[in-house]
């Protein structure tokens, strides 16, 4: 009876350890839980500690009443995830990433899949999957909905080791909740930061990671003397267009300043401040090329080649 109680307590302790994201030792975790040391003998404690010293982040998949089912070197399992398990403040523009214990690849079975879906109704999210070495990246086609629970699920065997074809992942599932408190982020700007030889008739565009609308502050275009450059600002979908009212000066430096709150998303989250600089100039033509060059005859033995 005593041995049965010890075994049950050991399983409970190990399960508690898997929920802790830090690789702490079993002894310190045991003390936090208020479990007296005498319920686990020294050999059991040392064996548990040895697994944690190897740097494994354990998953409840491997829990049993003995230690034989813990992951071993070469096993395929998720060691780091972004977002972390049960994270509740995930930005809606997240591109989830799962890092594995070994270099990985997709298996060749089309019936096993890696999926991202909205938990309510199990609605799938379309997007692309990409593997780089030991990390799989999930790139949704569009921004996720805010304040919504999502899940990432990997079928058993869908991910395999590239170093040992006999090793594959067990079934994996994690959930997270998006938040609507993240600010819109600039993902592209034209002209780009510190670009030179920009055309004097250039139109400036700023692209955000989501749909935005005009906010409480403004966009400023200034010359090298910090004087305002009159321009028309248009906010459309996820892009802000800034059209100077007159051509810019040639060979001059200009500054683009986006005041915090210049735009906000559909949830009312204001944008961060943003700053960029570029300079105008005449692009180099790289040397002139005749519009209609004369044909050139090259004779190679009996072969005559004409270039036009």
Image (spheres, rainbow, N blue to C red):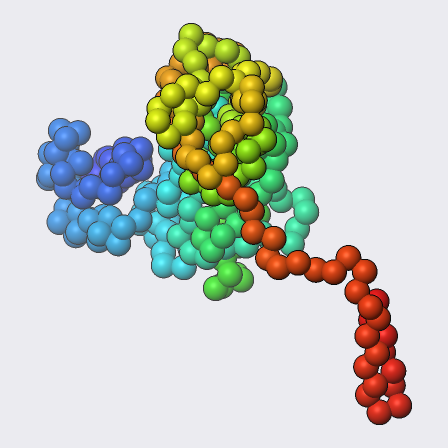
Q: Residue 204, relative to residue 58: is it above or below?
A: above
Left or right position of 251 against 7: right
State the image coordinates of residue 179 (x, y, percent, origin top left). 43, 18
Q: Name the foreground residue: 41 vs 82.
A: 82
Evaluate whether residue 43 shows in this view: yes
The residue at the point 55 percent across, 16 percent down is 232
**Quadrant holding the C terminus:** bottom right
State the image coordinates of residue 216 (x, y, percent, origin top left). 42, 7
Left or right position of 278 against 288: left
**Quadrant holding the N terminus:** top left
The residue at the point 87 percent across, 86 percent down is 303
Q: Name the foreground residue: 197 vs 250.
A: 250
Q: Name the foreground residue: 45 vs 164.
A: 164
Q: Which image quadrant is residue 299 in?
A: bottom right
State the image coordinates of residue 247 (x, y, percent, origin top left). 56, 27
Q: Residue 284, relative to residue 39: is it above or below?
A: below
The residue at the point 61 percent across, 53 percent down is 285
Q: Tell which residue pokes out farthest to the top in this image.
A: 216
The residue at the point 43 percent across, 14 percent down is 218
State the image coordinates of residue 157 (x, y, percent, origin top left). 56, 49
Q: Residue 112, relative to residue 292: is it above or below?
A: above
Q: Which image quadrant is residue 143 in?
A: top right
């Amino acid at each position: 009876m005593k041995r049965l109680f010890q075994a049950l307590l050991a399983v409970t302790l190990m399960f508690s350890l898997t929920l802790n994201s830090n690789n702490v030792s079993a002894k310190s975790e045991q003390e936090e839980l208020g479990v007296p040391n005498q319920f686990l003998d020294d050999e059991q404690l040392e064996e548990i500690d040895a697994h944690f010293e190897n740097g494994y982040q354990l998953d409840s998949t491997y829990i049993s009443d003995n230690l034989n089912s813990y992951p071993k070197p070469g096993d395929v399992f998720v060691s780091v995830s972004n977002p972390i398990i049960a994270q509740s403040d995930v930005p809606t523009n997240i591109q989830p990433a799962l890092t594995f214990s070994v270099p990985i690849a997709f298996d060749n079975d089309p019936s096993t899949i890696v999926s991202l879906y909205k938990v309510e109704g199990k609605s799938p999210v379309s997007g692309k999957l990409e593997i780089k070495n030991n990390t799989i990246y999930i790139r949704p086609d569009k921004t996720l909905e805010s304040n919504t629970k999502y899940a990432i699920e990997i079928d058993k065997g869908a991910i395999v080791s590239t170093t040992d074809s006999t090793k594959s992942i067990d079934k994996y599932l994690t959930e997270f909740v998006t938040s609507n408190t993240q600010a819109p982020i600039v993902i592209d700007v034209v002209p780009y930061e510190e670009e030179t030889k920009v055309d004097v008739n250039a139109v400036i565009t700023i692209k955000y990671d989501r749909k935005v609308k005009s906010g409480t502050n403004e966009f400023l275009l200034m010359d090298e003397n910090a004087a305002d450059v009159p321009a028309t600002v248009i906010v459309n979908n996820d892009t802000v267009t800034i059209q100077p009212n007159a051509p810019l000066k040639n060979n001059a430096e200009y500054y683009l300043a986006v005041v915090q709150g210049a735009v906000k998303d559909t949830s009312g989250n204001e944008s961060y401040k943003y700053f960029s600089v570029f300079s105008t100039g005449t692009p180099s033509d790289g040397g002139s090329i005749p519009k209609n060059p004369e044909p050139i005859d090259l004779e190679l033995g009996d072969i005559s080649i004409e270039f036009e």
